[in-house]
Image (tube, helix red, strand yellow):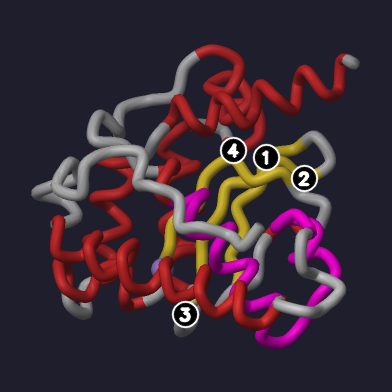
Amino acid sequence: MPFTLPNLPYAQDALEPHISANTLSFHHGKHHNAYVTNLNGLIEGTEHEGKSLEDIIKNSDGGIFNNAAQVWNHTFYWHSLSPNGGGEPSGALAEKINADFGSLDKFKEEFSNAAKTQFGSGWAWLVLDNGKLKITKTGNAETPITQNQIPLLTLDVWEHAYYLDYQNKRPDYIETFLNKLVNWEFAAENFGKQEVFKAA
Ligand code: MN3
């Protein structure tokens, strides 16, 4: 079965005024959709047809990798944002952030720095790497799932993610993400799944 574009987990205008419906109509409806369409075209009749997205990402390169990873990264990104986002993490994740970064403010500083300094197109991530929280950044379509890291959150820093709303002001988009949009519940879910996995 070919891959399909997943729906956004909220209405297209739900992130306004921070991310406009116009941005989401292009970013989800055009960019993300194009990665899905391209991927389906590229894998047709190849060994990748019928495989899971993660399996394709871990066993491909070139155009197939780029489109597959971008499909995965974007779906993960939509969930990293919430109309009720911002605020602070709670519970085990909050404790882990304090333990591994020192404080939430320190986490924000490091995450913001990674997102600002990703030169050109790419992504900033909060990942769990060998039991420790880390901030990473990846170029273009690169994704932590090929590095044996468990992603908890991501921010798309390709220009198409923010240019209509913030123009060249990437730092303002990053600050808005960290203060108004970041979905700590999603991060906690991803963190919790990992804890369950470890305990099993
Ligand atoms: Mn994007």
Disc 2 + disc 1, Cβ < 8 Å: yes
**109 on left or right of 47:** left
Residue for point 82% across, 64% down: 58
Question: Which comes sooner in the sequence, label 2 or label 4?
Answer: 4
Residue for point 45% across, 57% down: 5
Classify 10 Å Cα crowding around label 4: few (below 14), some (14-19), many (20 and above): some
Camera-nearest label, 2 or 4: 2
Question: Which comes sooner in the sequence, label 4 or label 3?
Answer: 4
The answer to whether the residue bearing label 4 lies less than 8 angstroms from the nearest atom of ligand 1 is no
Name the quadrant of the N terminus: bottom right
> Residue 133 shows which numbered tag?
1
The answer to whether the residue bearing label 2 lies less than 8 angstroms from the nearest atom of ligand 1 is no
The verdict on residue 52 being magenta is yes
Question: Which comes sooner in the sequence, label 3 or label 2?
Answer: 3
Q: Name the residue under label 3.
A: 121
User: Spatial distance from mark 2 to mark 1, Cα to Cα?
Assistant: 6 Å
Secondary structure at numbered mark 2: strand
The verdict on residue 159 being magenta is no
Residue 56 location (% of width, % of height) = 77, 65
**Main secondary-structure element of the magenta-colored stretch:** helix
Residue 190 position by quadrant: top right
Instruction: From the viewer's side, name the closer residue of 130 and 108.
Output: 130
Residue 164 in sight in this render: yes
Camera-nearest label, 1 or 4: 1
| Amino acid on which the number 1 mark rests in the picture | Leu
| Amino acid on which the number 2 mark rests in the picture | Asp
**80 on left or right of 49:** left
Q: Range of the magenta residues?
A: 51-77
